[in-house]
Structures are given as structure tokens and as C-alpha cells.
Amino acid sequence: MKIIDGGVTAAAGFEAAGVEAGIKYRNRKDMALVYSAAPCTAAGVFTSNVVKAAPVRWDKEVVEHSACVQAVVVNSGIANAATGRQGYECCRQTAEKAAGLFGISPDAVLVASTGVIGSPLPMDRVLDGVEKLAACKAATFEAGTMAAEAIMTTDTISKQAAVQIEIGGRTVTIGGMCKGSGMIHPQMCTMLGFITTDTAISKELLQEALREDVADTFNMISVDGDTSTNDTLVVLANGMAGNEEIREKNDDYYRFKEALNHIDTTLAKMMAGDGEGATALFETKVIHAATKQDARVLSRSVISSNLCKAAIYGHDANFGRFLCALGYSGVQFDPDKIELYFENGEKSILIFKDGAAVSYSEEEASQVLASPEVRVLVDMHMGEAEASAWGCDLSYDYVKINADYRS
Amino acid sequence: MKIIDGGVTAAAGFEAAGVEAGIKYRNRKDMALVYSAAPCTAAGVFTSNVVKAAPVRWDKEVVEHSACVQAVVVNSGIANAATGRQGYECCRQTAEKAAGLFGISPDAVLVASTGVIGSPLPMDRVLDGVEKLAACKAATFEAGTMAAEAIMTTDTISKQAAVQIEIGGRTVTIGGMCKGSGMIHPQMCTMLGFITTDTAISKELLQEALREDVADTFNMISVDGDTSTNDTLVVLANGMAGNEEIREKNDDYYRFKEALNHIDTTLAKMMAGDGEGATALFETKVIHAATKQDARVLSRSVISSNLCKAAIYGHDANFGRFLCALGYSGVQFDPDKIELYFENGEKSILIFKDGAAVSYSEEEASQVLASPEVRVLVDMHMGEAEASAWGCDLSYDYVKINADYRS
């Protein structure tokens, strides 16, 4: 697997654009387009929130029932959620506008929105924005970057990744972009994520690969425990790499899945590390758990805990909070058996063993917790399963951003 | 029901004390005693956290297996959790010390601790503290208040309540105290709570009344989503009011339960309103839900949401976050059917109806949210069940307190 620069335009046949449409923000890009020269097989996972935004309802229809997808139109600033029947009508109008410009069917167009819940979309500006997007789309790295910038809300960095692998003698590329900084606690998938590939793969396997991979990547991050109304992750595969279509779970399939996992993991960690107000990426890795599900639940419980997050922010080796968060996760275990380490990639400090704290240097532990990437390693000594979850610390700025976000 | 001043010493035969023992804090009371002149029937509910503090394990044994209880010894500053076998030994030594001083059996003594997890208790100071407590215990209001102050950690106010009712021609009294400000998200009960009564009631009915009432009171509050290792709520009933013992679910039982509910609700709301860094008590009441359980889950989901809590702190009528939190609660409902109001006891403002925002004054809504007690009322239009949950807003000070708490 070769890691390359790029995002949604890295794979053959994909173009992108990002423009200023004035939806809500001023003086910044707020609409994005992803377009494929060839019809794509599409797979998607969406929020489990009962209050589903209009574009989520639209996209579920398209992904489940359309033969192919060729374009995605995204806006930031307004989420088009809790907007009633009118909100769904906005999705239709946006898709019809794009379809008209590209000479494709409206049901080959996905739409996505992110931002404030409950406000109506200014449709005149949205439709003007679609025209601008169509006029300037390009297959360049720069165009992909502009799209990645246009979908940001409280994100401080744009998030892209791309890799290449060989499938059946052909080089295939997978690239993606995502956004997300607050209201991040995916239950079925995550905030907005768009992955493009020129791999030829059947719709069933594409959906299965995505669903399985999301469980270990986007579903393992949390910024604030709030599962959005708009969480959307879609993969578009246009087959332009020319490989023989992947139709069964052969070596090609697993190589594709490994590459997809790299993209998903990279983007998910970027999102967690760029959580609202974050000063550190906060990983928890649970090893030797009884089951995979246990490992996931335990690691997620720790990175979701406000008290653990505040301890990371304060560089305070208050290990009891980490034990506490493992303990209320719902998983059964023997506290006397577990070992807990604080790590930062360079150092690994054993803190807790045999049911009590070991003798460790508070100063050294605090130094480790002051790193930009902090890991808590928990050895359950119960089995062979492991999982990682990613979050961020809880800072004053998280409160500041969210007490003021709408105004 | 008559609401009276007082706490754990309000009922006949109960004494209390609060002293400085220097466990961890300096220049403040940090050990408390509750003592009954007569042996008590005891009931208790404890944390569901797998990592149970040593005193929780001790108290579960005592409440389940001892014929009676006569004393409770509490310390703040150190939680005696994640302290291994030595931690349990500390409980035994504390109970034996108190038992020796009072001439009772060690298994008639409950112990409780709250504070930092993982540190060992300084047993010499604890045992000296028990002697001091025994020396100054009294049946006065002042002694009860000193006990309520001694169990505080990050609490800013001490928390007591008492009521009187008539049972079989006798006046019976129920009083209680509790503490709790952070790591508050009870799953089986809450932080430390101690309720005393002179009612004569069977152990089975006392336990049942407590367990049922906790589900609607202490289990409906959350400050930060973290379920403590030490959550403990016990009721001691010494029968000294002289009423005929309540042995069946007659009118007396339900009158007792109503009074208990008043004490539990009052204490639980005091705890939520005094959440770490809180500037407001944040209630969510869900009405016309399909089932009681749905109503509980929905209301708890809203008051537990960091984003809703930050919106309250910012006095921002960002109603989409409240819908979002209802939506990811796990309860199924039709978003188009619900109505959402912001209330403050004086005003009630309809915000959302028929799947979209109604026209309301942002300024007026913001004023309501700036009140010291804010209520979000959600009408599900699905059935007859209702529930309330209580939390607080999320402020800079929450982060400050928890980034620095241990140091």
C-alpha cells in the first residue's frame, strides 16, 4: 500500500470543487462538489439518530435504490435537519439542479449538509452555488482540497487521505475527505465523509466492506458523546482503474479492505484530534479483552468520559477516572486483573496493576500526558480481542465554542 | 406532608457529627458520623460500576446480611476505590473502631468514602477521626449540618432535607443528606446519600420503596455522564416514632413512599443544581411518552448532552441540539409529532412543532434560558407516560475543576 497526497480527486475520473455560496458563513467556502466522469457504485452508512436530517433521508433512498451515483453536493453552515417536509424538498431541488447541469438523473445525485440544526436552507443561494461548483470543478489536488475546506464547520484543519494498491495488475486508488469537530459520537458512522475510488467492485461487497470497516474506525471516535442528525459516510467506486470487478471475497477484496481501512482510520483520527477545543488526540487501546465487542465498548467508554478528557487536558495522571470509565462501560471484568499504562509513542508508563497503583513518577506521567498524542493502554488479561478508540481532551475552548456556536 | 428544617438528625433517636480529620483536605471537616440510639432496619442501593470502591463492597455485605445497622462513618477526600485488598481492610478497621466505641457489632457499621480514586486511606487519621466523631455526636440540627458539610468534595453547598407525615396517629420524620457534584451519572443510585427515619417499617418494604423511588429521583440526574465507583444511598429506619410497623403496601406505606420521594427529589435536584461549574439547574420533562421507560431515557439523554448543556450555559436557544439528543437516545418516535418548549417557571415558549421551528422571539427564549432554573418541556404526543431528569449547564469552570481536581 502506497500512501499518496490527495483526497477525493486522487482516484481516476473524479473531479471536485469548493466555492463560496454565502449559505450562512461570510468570506469562506461553504459548498463542495464531488463528481465522477463515469457512473459509480455507491455504498453508505448513516446516522442512527431518530431525528434524521433531510439529506440523510434523501441519500439513504439514493444509495439503496439508485443503480448508480455520479455527483455529491455538500453545504456547510446549515444542517437542513428538523426542517420538516420543506427540508426534503430542498434536497430534491438541489439534486435536480445538479442533474440538469451534468445531464444525469436526480437520483444519481447525493446531497449532504452540516451546520446548525433547525434553520431553513436559503435555496436561491444553494442553487447559485451548484452552478458555481459545476463551472469550476476539476480533477486536481487543489480542487479536492478546496472541497475539503468547503465542508468544514468548527474544524480547524481540512481532512484528506489517499492510498494506492495493486489489484489484478492494475493500480487502484482510494481517496477521501471528511469533516467533523463537534457533535461527534457516531453510532452507525460519522459526520460527513466522502471516499472515492476507481476500483471496480460490486455494490454488495462495497457496502459490506464499508459497514465492517466503520465499526473499527469512524464508530470508534467521540468528541462529545452527541450523535449527529446528519452523520453520513459514502463511498463512490467508478471502476475506472480497469481492474476485473471484485465480486467475491478473494485476495483483491481483502487488499481493497485494508486500503479502505487505512483511509478510514486516518480520517477518523484526524477528526478526533481536531475535536472542538482539542489540544491532544486521546487514544485508548484495549488489549486481551474477552471479545471484540468488549474491547470496543471499553475503549470507547474511556475516550468518551468527560472526566478522563479533562484529566488529559490538565496533564493529570488521575488514573482512577480511567478505571472508573472502564467500570461503568457495561462490560464485566475483574479490576484486580487489569494493567493500565500511559503512553505517548516514546514512553510507556505502567500505572496500575494487581488492583492498586504501582509506584510511578507523577512528573514523568504528567509529561507523557502533555504530548499531542496520548495513549492509554489497558491490558484486560481476559482473552485475545483488542480495539482502539480515539477522542480528544476537554478544554475551556470546547465550552466556549459550544456556548457561542450559533451566534 | 410537612416540610421541616433539618437533615439526618431530624428523626427521633438520630445523632450526627462532622469533624476535621486531615484525611486529605486541610482546614475543613472531612469525616462524618450518623448514629442511631436504637438498631435500624437498613436498605441501600449502590453503584453499578464494575470497579466498586471498597466501602461499597463492605456496605452491600452489611445491608444484605446484617440484622440491623446503627452507625455510618463517612470520609471525604479519598474514595478508597481501586485500592485492592488493603482498601477493604481499611473498611473493616474503621467499622471495628466505631463498633468498639459504641459497644455494637462491626457488622452494624456502614462506611462510605468519596474523593480521589486510587489513593490509600491514611488509617491513623481515619481512626483518630472516628474517636473525635464519637466524642462530639449530637442530635441537634447543627450536628446534622456539620455532618452534611463534612461529606462535601467539590460541592459548593451542603445538601439536607426533612419532612414529617402522620402514620397511624404518630408523627414520623424522614430526613436526609447527600453530597455530589462531579462524576455524577447514577445507574443504580447516586453519590453518597444518607436518609434517616424514625418510621417502623419492614426491611423488605424499605428496600422496595427505596429501589423504586431511586429510579425517578437520583437515577434521573447527571452532571457529567460518569458513573462513580462509590455511589451509595442508604436509608436507616429505627422505628422510634412508635407507629405500628409497616408490613404491607397499605395507605401508610404509600404515604411513607410519598415522603421519601420528596426527600429524594429535593436532594437529587440540589445535587444537579450544584453540579461542578454549574450556573443553572437544567431540567428536562418529557410528557405523553409511550412508556415510562421511554420518558426516562429521553429526558436523561437531553440533560446528559454536552452540547445541550453548553447551549444552556450560553443562553442559546439552539433547539436543534435538544432534538438531536432526543433522537440518539435509542427511543423510537416521529420527530414531526413532538412539541418542544423552553420554560423557567414564569414563561413557557413554544419553539418546535410539526417537524419545524415555529416563529418565536430569540431574545425572549434567551432570557428564559438565562434563568437559574431552566426547563425544557417535550410533548411526545404518543401516550400517557412522563418523567423528569435534572442536570446542569456545562461551563468553563467544569473544565477548570476537573483539569485541576487532584492537584
Image (cartoon, coloured by chain):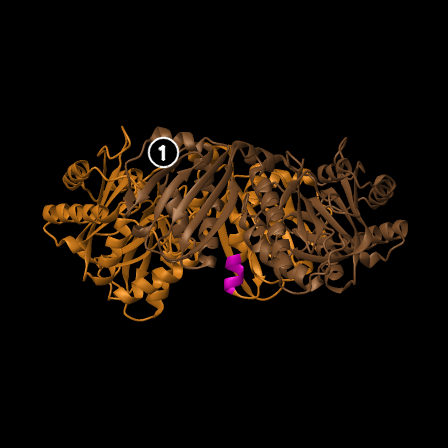
Chain colours: A brown, B orange
Q: Residue at x 59, y 54 (%)?
A: A214
Placement of A66 over or under B394, stated as above or below: below
Q: Is A134 left or right of A366, judged from the image as shown? A: right
Query: Callout 1: residue from which chain?
Result: B
Q: Position of residue A44 (x, y in %)?
A: 68, 56
Q: Secondary structure at mark 1?
A: loop
Label the magenta part by its dominant secondary structure. Answer: helix
Front residue of A271/A254: it is: A254
Quarter holding the C terminus of chain A is top right
Q: Is A169 left or right of B389, judged from the image as shown? A: right
Placement of A62 over or under B184, stated as above or below: below
Q: Position of residue B284 (x, y in %)?
A: 54, 51
Front residue of A403/A203: it is: A203
Span colored in magenta: B292-297
Q: Categorize mark 1 by other alpha carbons within 10 Å: few (<14), some (14-19), many (20+).
A: some
Q: Is A264 left or right of B115, judged from the image as shown? A: right
Residue A30 falls in image quadrant: top right
For the view shown, which residue lies furthest in the front direction?
Answer: A169
Q: Residue at x 61, y 40 (%)?
A: A181
Q: Residue at x 71, y 50 (%)?
A: A172
Front residue of A69/B384: it is: A69
Q: Position of residue A175 (x, y in %)?
A: 69, 46
Q: Position of residue B113 (x, y in %)?
A: 28, 44
Say whether residue B342 is visible. Answer: no
Residue type indicated by callout 1:
Arg
Q: Which residue is mark 1?
A: B406
